[in-house]
Every structure is written in structure tokens, then in C-alpha cells.
Amino acid sequence: MKTKSLDDLFQDMLKDVYYAERKILKALPKMARGAQSPELKAAFEKHREETEIQVERLQQVFELIGKPARGKTCPAIEGIIEEGEEVLEEFKGSEAIDAGLIAAAQAVEHYEIARYGTLRRWAELLGHKQAAKLLQETLIEEETTDGSLTKLADASVNQAALKAA
């Protein structure tokens, strides 16, 4: 049996995040429809557009390393998305739904931040400079989205959920 290398691990995690991004693309419209705040709806719609570009970037990374763009089932993102769907179902019509949707979205963002940070570093170590640059672009977008969600929660959403209590 061949010993697995960092390059093998890099490719494996790249497949994982590619699968995750494509699942997120399907979940974001549901989250936008379920949001009560117009600002949150807009944030989800904006992130969907960014995610489409991020999927394209991942396809470029696969091309740069000479591999086909293929996903690998990611149980972590499946669970995180399932939790978001539970929020949609259990808090529908509640003032707390937007706070719950932001929490679910930030769980996704934190997962992506962890993955892209690791992938970018490994790409650098493996000498994939252009791939590292593309992964860094996505990492910055994910961190920006996380910060925007925090600002939205702090500015209005959490207070609205609290008032409804």
C-alpha cells in the first residue's frame, strides 16, 4: 500500500470543499427565502453569487494541479446544512429565525474559513503558487462574509429576537 502524502491530503480536502461549496449553493436560496430581514435576505443572495465564483475558482485550482474537479461527500457540511434546515423548520414565523439563520450561516463560514486557510497553506508548501492565490481570495471572502453576518446580528437581528422573547 502506497504511503499517502501531503499532496494526496491536499487533493482530498480540495474535493471535500468542492462538494461543500456546491451543497452550500443549493442551501443559500432556501435560507434567503426563510429570512425575515430584508438585509439578511440580501446577504444570503450576495453570498450565493460569491459562492458561484468560489466554485469556479476551485475548478481553476483543480485545473492548475492537473486533476478533474470532483467532489467527495463531506459529512461535516451535510450536518451543518441539516442544522440550518432545522432552524428554518422549527423557528418559521418566529422573530428568532433570523438569529438562528445567522448562527447556521456562520457555522458554514467557520467551516469554510478553516478549510480554505489549511488548503491555502498546503498549496504554498506544495509549490502551487497560483492555486494558493486563488484559495486566499476565497478565504478573504469567507472572512468578510462572516464579519458581515456578525455586524448584521449585532445591529438588529439579535435585538429583534430578544424583544420577541
Image (tube, helix red, strand yellow):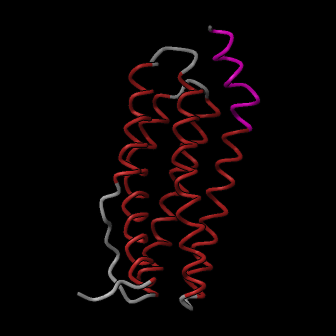
Quadrant location of residue 92?
top left
26 or 75, nearer to the observer: 75
Quadrant location of residue 18?
bottom left
Q: Position of residue 32 (x, y in %)?
A: 49, 35
Could you tell whether 160 is left or right of 46 in the image? right
**Quadrant the C terminus occupies:** top right
Q: Position of residue 66 (x, y in %)?
A: 38, 89
Farthest left residue?
Answer: 1
Q: Residue at x 50, y 57 (%)?
A: 51
Q: Residue at x 37, y 38 (%)?
A: 82
92 or 107, nearer to the observer: 107
Residue 145 position (above or below residue 157): below
Residue 90 located within the stretch drawn in magenta: no
Magenta range = 151-164
Q: Main secondary structure of the magenta part?
A: helix
**Quadrant the N terminus occupies:** bottom left
Q: Position of residue 163 (x, y in %)?
A: 68, 10
Q: Position of residue 98 (x, y in %)?
A: 57, 26
Q: Residue at x 41, y 19 (%)?
A: 90
Q: Residue at x 43, y 63 (%)?
A: 17
50 or 163, nearer to the observer: 163
Could you tell whether 127 is left or right of 7 in the image? right
Q: How many marks?
A: 0
